[in-house]
Image: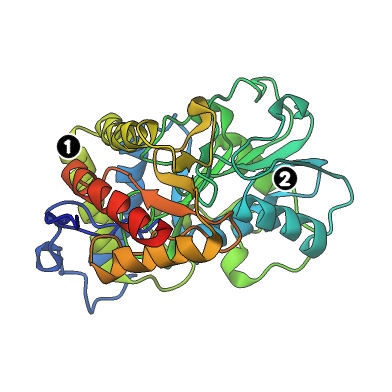
Amino acid sequence: MKPVIKPANPNFSSGPCSKRPGYRLEALDARTLGRSHRSAIGKEALGRACDETARLLGLPAGYRVGVVPASDTGAMEMAMWSLLGPRPVDVFAWESFGKEWLTDILTQLRLPEVQAFEADYGELPDFSRANPAHDIVFTWNGTTSGVKVDKADWISDQREGLTLCDATSSVFAMEMPWEKLDVVTFSWQKVLGGEGGHGMLILSPRAVERLESYTPSWPMPKIFRLTKGGKLMEGIFRGETINTPSMLCVADYLDALEWVDGMGGVNAAIAKSRANLAILERFVSERDWISFLAKRESIRSNTSVCFTLALAQEQVKRMAALLEQEEVAYDIGSYRDAPPGLRIWCGSTVAAEDLEALLPWLDWAYNEVAR
């Protein structure tokens, strides 16, 4: 029978992700709207976005946080274009976005010494092959594969190279070993359910040292420039953005940070996301028609949870369309480059009761298309 109870919030998209419970647009602090981002009130809001991010994440002393253009993609490409070149590079890729960074490094930057370590969807590459004398580029959580890095002991504490980590669907949802990460990027519209278009760039003192001692041989667009006269542009990390940001998006991000703080901080957000994953794990364990794309539990993402189904590709599409038609789950089809299946976001902005309400609908939709 068709279920009766529907999720109060059917938004399970993996980006932009669901707004936090209780979110109201009219509750945002709108004092910065219509004001210059260079005004005192504008710079204060942007500076607070950087400072509160650092505080809530518990970043080590000396780490810098900046707001940069073009979402996580802009932050990651800014880092690669600015920092890579002086050392060989090891790239670890196991899903769409990690493979995009590999393509950039090979075909755009055209670096001469690159080692690529790849794995299929649902698995991780062999991190033990990382060379501590090389720069390392990798994603922490594969948003399109549902696979996360489960430990960081493969990153040497005595490394000579830098680690560049795309962490857009893991920051605020997974424990991050900050001392092992020299560059971390993420975006507002992922774990915290913020608005798109803005990226966050976190730099360690080692990354700053590289920026101030190395000049890339290629031209640098204005929105990629992090130094001037051989020195870091410190203003970027105090809220003086490279280009004009949306102050509405800034207000939205500050609201999300305040919510995390109010629930008990990043550890509480991580616990909530893990509890959401456990709901899905119980569901899968009791059915033979749905499986995690990540077979190994230790590497299973607790944000972008990816599934394979005992259905043909067209049946999977029909199932996702049925769920959307019934207004119980929006945007849960697998990423276009990933194996056919479903992808359900279960980060901390998703309410456990909405996940529980969704599960009977998954059974119903499967039976509808499988018969």
Q: Residue 333's spot in the image, x, y percent? A: 44, 60
Asked whether, in this view, residue 129 is left or right of residue 144, the answer is right
Which residue position is annotated with label 2? 213
Q: Residue 352's spot in the image, x, y percent? A: 20, 41
> Do tag 2 and tag 1 residues touch (Cβ < 8 Å)?
no
Which residue position is annotated with label 1? 263
Asked whether, in this view, residue 306 is left or right of residue 192, the answer is right
The three-letter amino acid code for the residue at tag 2 is: Ser
Q: How many other residues sit within 10 Å of disc 1, few (<14), some (14-19) or many (≥20)?
A: few
Q: How many other residues sit within 10 Å of disc 2, few (<14), some (14-19) or many (≥20)?
A: few
Q: Quadrant of the N terminus?
A: bottom left
Asked whether, in this view, residue 69 is left or right of residue 48, the answer is right
Q: Is residue 212 above or below residue 301?
A: below
User: Outermost residue toward the right?
Assistant: 112
Q: Quadrant of residue 118?
A: top right
Q: Quadrant of residue 318?
A: bottom left
User: Element under label 2?
Assistant: helix
Q: Residue 8's spot in the image, x, y percent? A: 14, 57
Q: Quadrant of the C terminus?
A: bottom left
Q: Is residue 252 above or below residue 247?
A: above
Q: Is residue 143 above or below residue 318?
A: above
